[in-house]
Image (cartoon, rainbow, N blue to C red):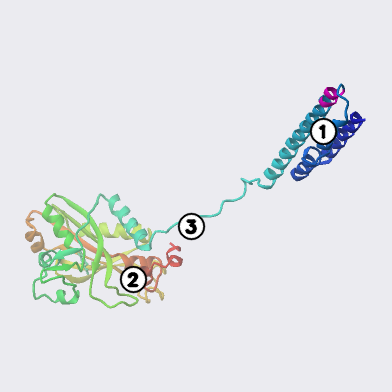
């Protein structure tokens, strides 16, 4: 009688398990058959009705049935777990062929792009890159550059004074003096850097901007060296077809002095709105180093001569990228910077 019941329970449990396809169903089956009120537990309760001599045999049978059901439960549970794992893996699959999300990276500022280009050109011609202090004395910024106390150039370059003698440099030309005082001949250097002038901000002015100074001092340097060097510079910066012209000018620290124009790189020199129909665009100031300037830095003008030039970095950047407002260079709006 009990044997029959046990057999039925076993078959029922195994049949139910075979159809079970979720972990919670397995749990329910465990409770239903092996739980406190489960059918197998009920059978155990009826053991008291079994005759003494049959008890060990029936007891063994109950244990076998329990073991069989437990094994089947475990087996099924494993199958379901494996199935769930596979389902999960299928859902979480990563397509490695999908393009990655783009990371935004920074951009070089147009000033930096132009400066690196200038450095590349002059380093290629054997120049070294120097840097001078932004805080200067009156001597380096003016006096040693042949700009005496009452010289109008001192008013022209509205100077930020820190005290009577110390100022924010108005030009990078002071680095010429530092280079000459160092006394290592010959000198072939450029010196980029920030300069300051007490100017109001507008589309073409800023109280701080950047210049690149150039200085060559050696025996036998002539105006022809200046012209050849700067013509080559212009070609490398604006293109092989670029022509240059030199207009007489005045700077206190050079004699003779000139301003250099390049042929308009938009129209090739025929005249357009970009060059205001001139065909030429002013690029830099230059000249032969004034003998007095050499002398003040202990260089004998009878033995040595040199040329110098000064370029406005922002001016080149504005021209090269056709930017019509200098303020854009200082606002650092990433939407603007990103374009270079
Ligand atoms: N220092 C001048 C300025 O700020 C630019 C300049 C002109 C520099 C002629 C030079 C030069 O070295 O030879 O306007």
From the viewer's side, name the closer residue of 294 and 134: 134
The disc, 3 or 2, on the residue closer to the chain's N-terminal end is: 3
The disc, 3 or 1, on the residue closer to the chain's N-terminal end is: 1
Q: Which residue is the site of mark 1?
A: 44
- Is label 3 or label 1 in front? 1
- Is label 1 or label 2 in front? 1
Residue 132: percent from the left, percent from the top? Answer: 20, 58
Q: Which residue is the site of mark 2?
A: 280
From the viewer's side, name the closer residue of 300 and 162: 162
Task: Identify the residue at horizontal 27%, vertical 51% (top origin).
Answer: 125
Q: Which residue is the site of mark 3?
A: 104
Q: Which residues are magenta?
A: 54-59
Query: Quick check: marks 3 and 1 in contact, CB under 8 Å?
Result: no
- Is label 3 or label 2 in front? 3
From the viewer's side, name the closer residue of 166 and 115: 166
Secondary structure of residue under mark 1: helix
């Amino acid at each position: 009688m009990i044997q029959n019941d046990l057999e039925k329970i076993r078959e029922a449990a195994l049949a139910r398990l075979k159809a079970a396809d979720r972990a919670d169903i397995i749990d329910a089956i465990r409770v239903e058959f092996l739980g406190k009120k489960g059918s197998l537990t009920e059978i155990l309760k009826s053991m008291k009705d079994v005759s003494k001599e049959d008890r060990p045999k029936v007891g063994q049978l109950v244990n076998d049935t329990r073991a069989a059901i437990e094994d089947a439960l475990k087996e099924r549970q494993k199958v379901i777990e494996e199935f769930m794992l596979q389902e999960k893996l299928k859902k979480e699959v990563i397509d490695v062929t999908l393009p990655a999300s783009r990371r935004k990276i920074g951009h070089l500022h147009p000033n930096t792009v132009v400066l690196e280009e200038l450095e590349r050109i002059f380093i290629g011609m054997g120049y070294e890159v120097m840097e001078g202090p932004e805080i200067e004395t009156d001597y380096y910024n003016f006096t040693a550059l042949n700009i005496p106390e009452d010289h109008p150039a001192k008013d022209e370059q509205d100077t930020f004074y820190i005290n009577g003698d110390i100022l924010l440099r108005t030009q990078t030309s002071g680095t010429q003096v530092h280079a000459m005082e160092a006394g290592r001949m010959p000198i072939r250097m450029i010196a980029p850097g920030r300069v300051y002038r007490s100017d109001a901000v507008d589309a073409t002015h800023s109280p701080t901007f950047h210049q690149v100074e150039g200085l060559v001092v050696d025996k036998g340097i002539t105006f022809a060296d200046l012209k050849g060097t700067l013509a080559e510079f212009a070609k490398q910066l604006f293109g092989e077809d670029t022509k240059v012209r030199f207009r007489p000018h005045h700077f206190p620290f050079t004699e003779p002095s000139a301003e250099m124009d390049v042929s308009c790189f938009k129209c090739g020199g025929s005249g357009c709105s970009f060059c205001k129909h001139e065909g030429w665009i002013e690029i830099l100031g230059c000249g032969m180093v004034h003998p007095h300037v050499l002398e003040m830095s202990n260089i004998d003008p009878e033995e040595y001569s040199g040329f110098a030039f000064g370029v406005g970095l922002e001016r080149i950047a504005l021209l090269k990228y056709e930017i019509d407002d200098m303020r854009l260079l200082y606002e650092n709006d990433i939407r603007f910077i990103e374009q270079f």
